[in-house]
Amino acid sequence: MSTDLQISSLTSWFPSAKSPLIISGPCGAETEKQVIETAVAIAELNKVNVLRAGIWKPRTRPDSFEGAGENGLKWLEKAKKETGLKTTVEVANAEHVKLALKYNVDILWIGARTTVNPFYVQEIADALEGIDVPVMIKNPLSPDLQLWIGALERINRAGITKLIAVHRGFYSYSNSTYRNSPQWQIPIELMQTIPSLPVICDPSHIAGKRDLILQLAQQALDLKMCGLMIESHIHPDQALSDAAQQLTPVALSELLNSLVLRVEKSDNIEFQNTLELLRRKIDKIDHHLIETIAFRMQIVNKIGEYKSDHNVTILQLERWAQIINDRIPFGNNLALNPEFVKLLFQLIHDESIRIQTEIMNSSVEIKT
Ligand code: PEP
Ligand code: MN
């Protein structure tokens, strides 16, 4: 589905932002001391552009820390005066928008639990009508690109063109390494659908644990995301929310210093030629791969006809088990990731079943 979003480029409204845009600060504003000390320490790194802090915390269970409310906005305004950092807070309704603007918050953000619901997003859009403030929109909890784009469109139609999308991962039933599964293909598709939209990554909420943040942050930059939102806290272990994923300002500094900023293209002719040669090899291999798969499918066709003539079911579980038990170790011996080989053969097997079903159905049609 196409979209007609009107987006202002990040550099046009935030020229002082360094590349990549770095947003950091605590999950939640807890006390004046915590906000100011964190802000001062991260401002000293000279790499952070924006101070973040949750003022109203949407929590899964009711007895958790639910944020400092209006007091937190006062601390944030003070931190901004002391450090010169811009500020950003999460807003989940019209009242939050009004209060955040009253305390001169520079950028608003809509959280994952709000983006899921078009009623909430529309309420915020209505409250923003006629106001010129940048808005960041986190992906919805569920891996639904259209819902994310819908939220961007609602805010855009209220007249907000200073928009940023924030990738923070998606809720997943299956137990995985991450708190929220990254599903990189979704932000990639967003970037392809709306090329003018700046997309940044929040590796803290994807990771859920500090030691996974660097690798995710690097991956986001390698995928051409233009910024990072990383939670930091002067004493992370004492944090009232998301303690396991917040970094000390020192750890944040180490992380930012170890990120590698890769250039899009090198001007070096030798590099270009080598890359071109390797790409030509890949093109050839891909053609061979497709020819081999087509040849495999011709045999699948034959088997389908044979099974149909002998009235045998399409799916024979022991054969599928045999394929998997053979292909995974075979691939493993050639240094291929077992999970990758399994997914690849699931895909090939699905297509084989589709082809054989077609053959069976056409033979039924002929008989009737
Ligand atoms: C947050 O940034 O602290 C937060 C609540 O994030 P999300 O909406 O991504 O869960
Ligand atoms: Mn958080």
Image (spheres, rainbow, N blue to C red):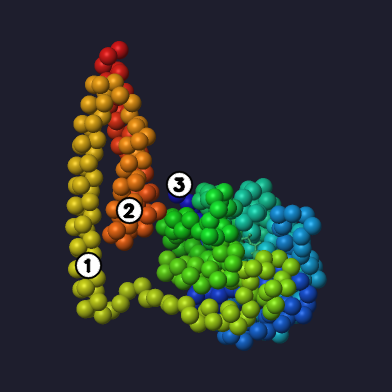
Disc 2 residue crowd, few under 14, some 14–19, many 20+, Cα 10 Å? some
Q: Residue at x 51, y 72 (%)?
A: 214
Q: Is residue 16 above or below residue 210?
A: below
Q: Is residue 158 above or below residue 16?
A: above
Disc 1 residue crowd, few under 14, some 14–19, many 20+, Cα 10 Å? few
Q: Secondary structure at mark 3?
A: loop
Q: Earlier in the sequence, mark 2 or mark 1?
A: 1
In the rendering, at what x and y percent does residue 43 appear? Answer: 63, 83
Q: CA distance from mark 1 to mark 3?
A: 35 Å
Q: Nearer the viewer, residue 306 or 12?
A: 306
Q: Nearer the viewer, residue 120 or 209?
A: 209
Q: Are marks 1 and 3 in contact (CB under 8 Å)?
A: no
Q: Quadrant of the C terminus?
A: top left
Q: Secondary structure at mark 2?
A: helix
Q: How many marks?
A: 3
Image quarter for residue 56?
Answer: bottom right
Image quarter for residue 251?
Answer: bottom right
Q: Quadrant of ligand 1?
A: bottom right
Residue identified by numbered label 2: 329
Q: Residue at x 37, y 34 (%)?
A: 317
Residue identified by numbered label 3: 1
In the rendering, at what x and y percent does residue 278 appear? Answer: 22, 67
Three-letter residue code for mark 2: Pro
Q: Nearer the viewer, residue 320 or 117?
A: 320
Residue identified by numbered label 1: 278
Three-letter residue code for mark 3: Met
Q: CA distance from mark 3 to mark 2?
A: 41 Å
